[in-house]
Amino acid sequence: MDGFQVDTDVLRRHATRVGQVAGDVGTAQSAAQTTDLNSGAFGLLCSFLPPIVAGTDQAARDAIAAVREAADAMVTEIGAMARSLDEVDGAVETRFQSLARALPR
């Protein structure tokens, strides 16, 4: 193996897709925040359930928030990776062009 190639346009498209997923997770997060598990939500017969599921409910909300935060961070980092690779590639190309000009023909 002589090296590797990275298509930064593919990285950017991937970041866009991850951003779309982050948006979907944000929708789920908003929905979870509007849900209220008070005793009235289950009626009189099942009024004992809210205290039982309250811990699970909060854990689910926290997990959704963590996934959203991670997805947003991934979008940022994938974009930064693409920019960095483009910058390095440009710098290497410039150096090779300088070297080619300095060599006798």
Image: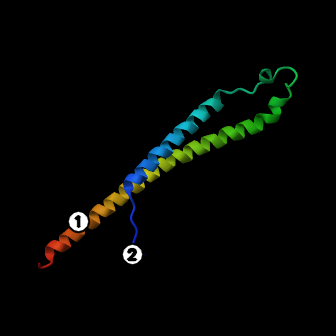
Q: In the image as oriented, which residue stretches furthest toward the left?
A: 105
x%, y% of residue 49? 83, 30
Horizontally, is 105 left or right of 99 in the view?
left
x%, y% of residue 5? 39, 65
Q: Specify the label residue 2 is tagged with.
A: 2
Horizontally, is 17 left or right of 42 in the view?
left
Q: Residue at x 80, y 24 (%)?
A: 42
Q: In the image as oriented, which residue stretches furthest toward the bottom?
A: 104
Residue 38 versus residue 2: which sits nearer the camera? Answer: 2
Q: Specify the label residue 94 is tagged with.
A: 1
From what the image shows, is residue 81 above or below residue 5? above
Q: Amino acid at mark 2?
A: Asp
Q: Residue at x 69, y 40 (%)?
A: 60
Secondary element type, mark 1: helix
From what the image shows, is residue 53 above or below residue 86? above
Quadrant assignment for the N terminus: bottom left
Residue 1 versus residue 85: which sits nearer the camera? Answer: 1
Quadrant location of residue 8?
bottom left
